Image: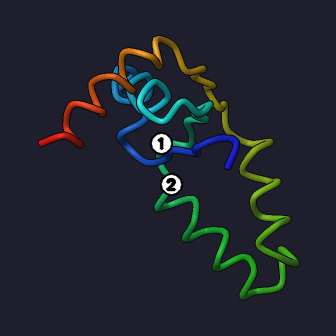
Amino acid sequence: MTCCTLSAAGIRNELLCRFAANATGKEVIAGPAEATATGNILVQSIACGQINSLAQGRDIVRKSFEMKVYEPQETEIWSREYGKTEKR
């Protein structure tokens, strides 16, 4: 896994997104905030034949919503602190 995708209301919390990138050491792609409604529309569109596949739906979402990318930083600190919890 090279990246982590976050969606729904939690992406509005920039600190949460930064912590997710730092803790996992993976790039985090955040968006869209209204993932439940967007997913519902996509599934209905597939069922009605307006969209041919889930892959096509995902492509539409990527092109329709702004995605914010968070690069991992200070991963050594996160790894060290995680290591402390393993020893307990």
| Distance in Å between CA atoms under marks 2 and 1 | 6 Å
Residue at (33, 22) in percent of width and height = 80
Residue at (65, 32) in percent of width and height = 67
- Name the residue carrying label 2: 35
Q: Nearer the viewer, residue 45 or 3?
A: 3
Q: Secondary structure at mark 1?
A: loop
- Name the residue carrying label 1: 33
Classify the position of the C terminus by image quarter.
Answer: top left
Residue at (65, 41) in percent of width and height = 3
* Disc 2 residue crowd, few under 14, some 14–19, many 20+, Cα 10 Å: some
Task: Report the side of 13 relative to 22 (left or right).
Answer: left
x and y percentages locating residue 87 in the rendered image: 19, 40
Q: Residue furthest top?
A: 74
Q: Nearer the viewer, residue 30 or 66?
A: 30
Residue type at numbered disc 1: Ala
Q: Nearer the viewer, residue 39 or 23?
A: 23
Above or below, comparing residue 54 to residue 88 in the picture: below
Above or below, comparing residue 17 to residue 56 in the picture: above
x and y percentages locating residue 73 in the rendered image: 51, 13
Q: Quadrant of residue 11?
A: top left
Check contact, mark 2 vs mark 1: CB within 8 A.
yes
* Disc 1 residue crowd, few under 14, some 14–19, many 20+, Cα 10 Å: some
Residue type at numbered disc 2: Ala
Above or below, comparing residue 64 to residue 61 in the picture: above
Q: Residue furthest front?
A: 87
x and y percentages locating residue 86 in the rendered image: 23, 43
x and y percentages locating residue 17 in the rendered image: 43, 29
Task: Report the side of 44 relative to 14 (left or right).
Answer: right
